[in-house]
Amino acid sequence: MNPKNIEAFRAVMLSGSMTIAARDIHTTQPNVSRMIAHLEHELQMSLFERVGNKLHPTDEAIAFFKEVERYYLGLKTLRETAHNIKRFGSGRLRIATAPALGMGFISGVVRRFSDASPGVTVSVRTNNSATIEQLISSQLCDLAFAVYAGGGNSNDVKTEKLVDARGVCVLPPGHRLESHAMIEARDLEGEAFVSLSHHDGLRERIDALFEHENIMRTMLVETEFLSTVCCMVKDGLGVSIVNPLVAKDYIAGGLTIKPFSPRVDFPVYMLSPRHRPDSVLASRFADIVRTTLTQDLLAFAANSQA
């Protein structure tokens, strides 16, 4: 069935005139007449009757017109869907995040993103950085946020360092050092220390710092996640050096946070598939992450100096 013939039929039904219909669909009246005749031949039924100078649709035409309008309503819905995809994306965003960022920080970003993109489903997976890179390399996720990058799939993964967050010293409530404005490495001589596990690259950097200064700590507890480190420090098991983006979520629970010297950086990377352009949703989420990182770190620095 020729869509042009359907279009001509609809125009005649809406206008009640072949002349007006021809104007509406930008053709001539004889051409509209020919298209209606072809459609009647295809359908094997009469669609219009002329009574005097007026054109009247048959009962069959009225019934057929209802189906045609459903078809055009479907086309309108498709156009609106395409417009929304172009403007807002496909309706689902797949995110992977390291545990260090998967608590308060990513949760806050998702809330802001959802406010700006209502109706979009955000799927969040929490994995270690090596697994996250594999998820991006295989395009099982649209974006990922890791604390280290470059584990082996760099040809398939685009990496952007978002920030080097300056590490902070975390203390349990009532600790002897909580009155200090700045914690120096030498202040932690002999302290019980809650540390990351040995396979974590940040653990190696922190250990090297204390070894260089010849400062002895008591390695009381080792754990994989910075969130667990903060919980254990809060419960009095020792002190530690952690990412401020993680530490700030435990202030309300009584964790004491102090600036630390010398500087220890906790990097945050954003990963995306190298061979696929970012979607509208992924770009919007990435922008919110950048803005939130800046705002959170600035606010944290201001509160630390207050």
Image: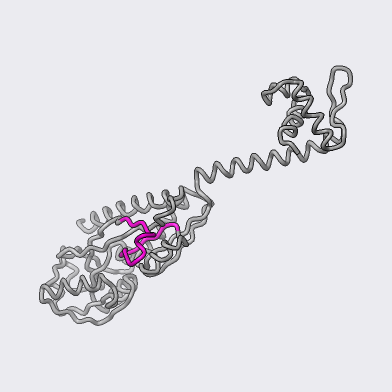
Q: Residue at x 82, y 29 (%)?
A: 37
Q: Quadrant of the N terminus?
A: top right
Image: magenta residue range: 142-160
Residue 263 image-quadrant placement: bottom left
Out of 290 and 103, give the one closest to the viewer: 290
Magenta region includes residue 158: yes
Q: Quadrant of the C terminus?
A: bottom left
Q: Is residue 131 left or right of residue 177?
A: right
Q: Is residue 53 left or right of residue 118?
A: right
Q: Is residue 252 left or right of residue 93?
A: left
Q: Position of residue 88 (x, y in %)?
A: 50, 46
Q: Does residue 119 sit above or below 209 in this rendering?
A: above
Q: Position of residue 285 (x, y in %)?
A: 42, 52
Q: Does residue 144 sit above or below 8 in this rendering?
A: below
Q: Residue at x 26, y 77 (%)?
A: 194
Q: Does residue 244 sit above or below 49 in this rendering?
A: below
Q: Residue at x 13, y 68 (%)?
A: 184
Q: Residue at x 21, y 79 (%)?
A: 192
Q: Position of residue 236 (x, y in %)?
A: 27, 77
Q: Position of residue 244 (x, y in %)?
A: 27, 63
Q: How is the image coloured?
A: one colour
